[in-house]
Image: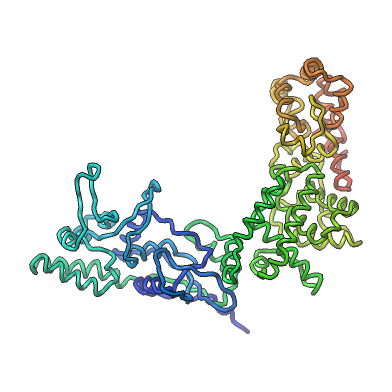
Amino acid sequence: MTHAASTFETIEPNLGELLANIRAGKIQLPDFQRGWVWDDNRIRSLIASVSMSYPIGAIMTMETGDNFRFLPRTFEGVSLLQKVNPDILVLDGQQRLTSLYLAFLSGKPVPTTTEKKKEIERFYYLDMEKCLDPYTDRFDAVISIPENRQITSDFGRKTELDLTNREMEYKNCMFPLLLIYDLQGFAQWKQGYVQYFNNTPEKFQFLSNFELEVWLRFQQYKVPVIKLNKDTPKDAVCQVFENVNTGGVSLTVFELMTATYAAEGYRLREDWEKRKKSLQEHHALQGIDESMFLTAVTLLTSHQRHVKDKTAVSCKRKDVLELSLDDYQKNADIIVDGMRSAAKILAREKIFEERNIPYQTQLVPLSAICANLGKRVENDSIKERIIRWYWCGVFGELYGGANETRYALDMVGVINWLDGGDVPATIRDSNFSPTRLLTLQTRLSAAYKGLMALLMKKGSRDFISGDPIELNTYFDSVIDIHHIFPAAYCEKLNFKREMWNSIINKAALSGRTNRILGGHKPSTYIQTIQKQEKVEPEKLDKIFESHLIDPDFIRSDDFFNFIQNRAKLLLNTIEDATGKAIAGRDSKEVVKAFGGAL
């Protein structure tokens, strides 16, 4: 029986040793770590805890190794004469260690902020008398001094505390924390202190008490350190960081890959920013983020490997973290082209902008499929099949949870299907319940957005202008979703909200048209449209039909027959898009909800 080796060990080095190794560059940060952000009061509180030998939490580190490397960077305030390859990288504890290093070893004022985020620079001192007073809160004994080493009042006219030279430090019994780990400097400071007070026994005893009760605590202070060994895989590093990071901000896969590629001299973030700017020229692609992009590149790469070596297709976090720089550079441009092709397909389906995309996540496999197909995606029969798969994913509501497994299934399944194989899993799994129409109340639902796009695709036109809702009119006309039977009218007649606020009672219209509809019943606003806007009744009826609205029901204000009839037509539209019959249209549940079969 084999025993699993531990991925970490625990040690307890002295704080002074840790900080000295930070100064020497032996301990550094991986480049994915964020900047240092602690304010003045947090630094004072941290120093107070150390001075009392209180725990400040464990530090998480990782040994550097040859199996993979991150680009390292030194801690804030560290200046090395030449490049040093670190032995250790800090995963958790950056803020604490940086604060202590700057306050104790940097030799410079600490750049920090007030609680109101005003930038300041501070030196830190210990008020020796307050440190030895058992009734004084130790936080109050940690003194923060401006970079000129003076505290003033009355707009700078009155000096409250002056520590501009050693004599003033001795006079005010203020010990500079920049000497806390400088043994030679501390010895000289002590000698100067007793000489300043003419070797007075009381002052000598006072200094001895401070050294024993306060200074010695710093020298003996140990920090618990959890050290990951150098063989720890990247996905484990990412997960560990997320679990233990006390800053409360999760490490993203993109940040980890940025640091990984940077070690090979490649600037991933700069590359992504250029690609992002290019992609965002398409309104529908403005929601693509760096994580989705990396996942799509990984999915395409994994499928290429699958075709060559018959390996399984996967694009989970572990796979993204194993994406080589060569594979990224080979496939990143191809994915950009795939995303542009995906945007063209969405535009064909009347999905023009990010907020109207049913599932942002479905863009990942759609883009990878388009990238894989290259110019074949322009073939109309291939495009029709891709669109069918897409709508099955939308109305089957199959992309709402953890999606990496479905990405892989669809990447393989759709490509095989296009090459003559069986239909992909998403088409097989897709199912839509007729009563779901009543619960589609807001654009937060993927099926809601999808139905609105299909209505626009069918040629729905604005009630007044008669213009079809195309890309060239969508943004100029401020198209949005509005009630057909206005909300105020429905509430006045106590119609069920689940009916009048559902997608069955909504249409894509211009902002101007919606203002004319107001809160009036349909027969009233129809007369307004016909008389004021000079729209002929026959033409208006054709416009209603373009929205799957029966003109007779809306002209007679027949709300319930309108709802039942439009629900039937919406279900027919979903069937046409998915190529699948919707079961249960005559079930007892449907009859009860709609007053008849659909």
Image-quadrant location for residue 466: top right
Q: Is residue 300 visible?
A: yes
Residue 448 lies in what quarter of the image?
Answer: top right
Q: Is residue 140 above or below residue 54?
A: above
Q: Where's residue 284, x and y in %?
A: 72, 46
Between 544 and 133, the one lying in front of the other is 544
Name the quadrant of the C terminus: top right
Tell me where residue 18 sits by quadrant.
bottom left
| Residue beneath the point at 82% across and 59% down | 374
Q: Is residue 582 visible?
A: no
Q: Nearer the viewer, residue 481 or 134?
A: 481
Q: Is residue 68 left or right of residue 99?
A: right
Vertical relation: 300 (above or below) 449: below
Reply above or below: 403 against 498.
Answer: below
Give the number of marks: 0
Percent across and percent down for residue 200 are 8, 67
